[in-house]
Image (cartoon, grey):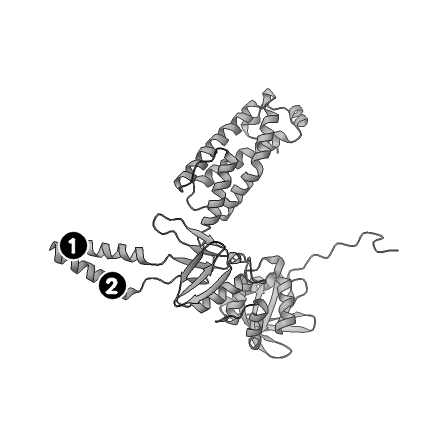
Amino acid sequence: MSESFRPHESSSIDAGLRTRLEGTIELLEDALPLLDSLMDVLARVEPSRDDVATLQECVTQLPRIDEAVDKAHRHEQSHTLTAAIGSRKRAAHLAANERLLSLGHDEVPSLRGAVSAVLELVRRQGTAPRPGEHALARSKSAPALLSLALGVVAAWAAYAVLGSGWALLLGVLAAVAVLRALAPKQWVLLPDRLFFSPKGAGLAREVLPSSMRGLACDGDKVSVQLADETIELHCESPERLVSLLHLLKGPWLAQLQSPPEKATVLEAMSEETKERGRALLSAEGLLFIPTASSNVAVRALCVETLPAPPTLEELLVLVGHLPAGRWSALGEHLVKTADARWFPKDAVTVEESANAHLGATLRCGEQGVRVTFGKAQLETEALISQLKAPHPDPLPAAQGEGES
């Protein structure tokens, strides 16, 4: 760490002690902002993904920090620094236990144990949908007619009993309270998780599709079997929800990222066969699937028989949430199983044309796909510019490599 960025708590420590302690002082200097970040996380009601990473980092680093404090505290020069670490640890331990108590859990005697307990609760609580995230499905809301009927009946009954205009307001409030109590818990399905909104004094909750053991339609709801419980998801289209969940827990579309990297779905046509379909364009390359191969592509990505398979556009939107390192494997799989075209970013070329504002032709070897920009012209042109950018040449082989 540069001297200009060192905390004032370590200003009395000279270079000689730093050398003798071999990185111990630097570890403690890094621990100060980490513990400050921990305090910030513990103060937030709805931690973010980054906050979860901070909690995990603290759980990992606390044993090393304790060891470094013991080692450094033997030297008088480091007393100010070790005292600052101790003060922050005590404050963090108090805050972590307060967080546990507020959630109905017992205090934990050690800081690392308390942070570990908070981490598990935060992971279960999950992360609420953020701007830019795509909701695949939502819970069914209470019927509007039922809400109106309950309000009218409750208001009339209250007025009949109390004989006052205020009774009308009390009746409406009572109806709202009853509806809220009877309404199923609200949830939203995102590409990487199923998120339940908090209800009453309860906490929010997150369920990963990979943890689902069984799925079944039951009237207007879907039953989801987890390791130790069954949850019910009330929705407008149970068969569609079951199909989405099967895809998200399957071998190819599990553990997606949300929000996705920049990607867009376009109308497209194969230059060789003149088949029309949809293409998914991203900085990773181009994936084209003919419309006639839509159901085949769905079966190639999910081992289950789906009661309501997604459209080709919906399927490609899901594929757009793949982490960067998994695009090529999925693209090559669909080439073999669904007559798709996969043009990876390091092999694709873009043809210039007179009507470049309307679309473009992308080629890989002897194959070509013509894409139509539509309403996504600016986004598409930006992605094509990334594909047209020169790619770095592979590093030359070491001299003598491969020689006998």
Q: Quadrant of the N terminus?
A: top right
User: Which numbered tag is attached to residue 189?
Assistant: none
Q: Quadrant of residue 5?
A: top right
**Up-down: is 20 above or below 48?**
above
Which residue matches tag 1? 167
Q: Residue furthest right?
A: 404
Q: Disc 2 marks which amino acid?
A: Leu
Residue lying at 27% horizontally and 66% vertically, measured from the top left: 145
Q: Residue furthest front?
A: 228
> Toward the viewer: 251 or 5?
251
Q: Disc 1 marks which amino acid?
A: Ala
**Up-down: is 122 above or below 18?**
below
How many numbered markers are drawn?
2
209 lies left or right of 201: right
Q: Position of residue 279 (x, y in %)?
A: 57, 70
SS type, badge 1: helix
Q: Is residue 5 visible?
A: no
Q: Residues within 10 Å of mark 1 (few under 14, many from 20)?
A: some
Residue lying at 64% horizontally and 70% vertically, measured from the top left: 335
